[in-house]
Image: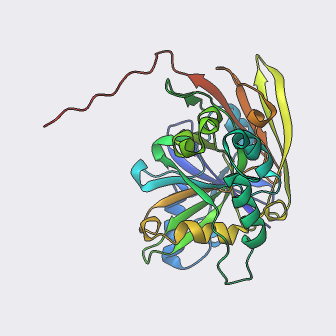
Amino acid sequence: MAMILMQRRAPDGARQVLATIDGKTRVVSGMESTRELAENAIAKGCGLREAVEAAGFGDTVDPEDELAQGRLLSPIDHPDPAHLTLAGTGLTHLGSAEGRDRMHKAAATGDATDSMRMFLEGLEGGKPAAGAIGQQPEWFWKGDGQHLAAPDAPLARPAYARDGGEEPEIAGIYMIDREGTPQRLGYALANEYSDHVTEKHNYLWLAHSKLRQASLGPELLVGDLPEDIRGTARIRRSGEVAWEKPFLTGEANMAHSIANLEHHHFKYALFRRPGDIHVHFFGTSTASFADGFATQDGDVFEIEAPPFALPLRNALSGETETERRVGVKAL
């Protein structure tokens, strides 16, 4: 049975790791972070569950109450944000090309856009035989640990942004061991928040549109990811549901295998630096922007999907100042 890990700030201010096993959530003795627990497991040559059981348990806690009290943190972080990489892949899900294709078709020539061609290539070659290398996906960088917003924390809409929209999906969480091998810690619910208006203006602005914050649900699922995940994404405005739609993920609903997406990220030696943490977003086929919905400051994004018990919520918070020019000084 899968295990869930969480990080919290206890009432006395101390950091702790929580583990949910067989429906019971307890403090993991002597561990201050998921990263520390992972380092311990790698050093011992065992899995995370074995490391948790070896450490022992403290008090029993209620995860829903911890979330309501604002004590749950992102399920992974790094004391030096520069050593946590946020990246992801797009056009990975069955149906994900439709909304993207509508965005870009007006500016494209020929019978198919670059988005549709990339999706079809992934559909044909994104799930290679075991041990083989498949078609590479679209890839993007979102930033480092400074861009990781905690559960229930606001997502900033900077002054230069043209939009702020949700992307409900699953993210893989990884640590690079001393030999440079990526070790997958597990999976988390995610909001890969992006600027779709900027992307729509010109597909070459995709890189700009992705340089935004992202948020992870408080739970890290340790073990196998279900093949078929069915969740719900919604936007609340003034407390009422203004937009809502189901989303599908898991490999049964994807054009690429997770192993293929992992290979095409970690094939770059730059991303195999020992000690680094990686959060990799696997993509989505659902976004309110594709339905013509325009978000507003104060809107609350809410994402939920079994097997994760807790929802991921973040409010959209815009800057009050207008964009200012950044000057450069010559030395």
Quadrant in the picture for the N terminus: bottom right
Say if residue 62 shows up in the picture. no
Quadrant in the picture for the C terminus: top left
Whole-percent x and y of residue 121? 72, 66
Q: Is residue 48 above or below residue 110?
A: below
Residue at the far left in the pictured view: 331
Q: Quadrant of residue 22?
A: bottom right
Q: Compare residues 265 and 222 and report the one nearer the observer.
A: 265
Q: Quadrant of residue 217?
A: top right
Q: Is residue 185 above or below residue 204?
A: below
Whole-percent x and y of residue 103? 72, 39
Whole-percent x and y of residue 292? 78, 29
Say if residue 135 shows up in the picture. yes
Residue 281 appears left or right of 122: left
Q: Residue at x 79, y 61 (%)?
A: 254
Q: Compare residues 121 and 143 and report the one nearer the observer.
A: 121
Q: Residue at x 76, y 20 (%)?
A: 237
Whole-percent x and y of residue 261? 65, 66
Count of numbered badges drawn on the protein: 0
Q: Residue at x 43, y 65 (%)?
A: 275
Q: Is residue 210 above or below residue 136?
A: above
Residue 198 appears left or right of 256: left
Q: Residue at x 74, y 55 (%)?
A: 116
Q: Compare residues 76 and 211 and report the one nearer the observer.
A: 211
Q: Is residue 196 above or below residue 316?
A: below
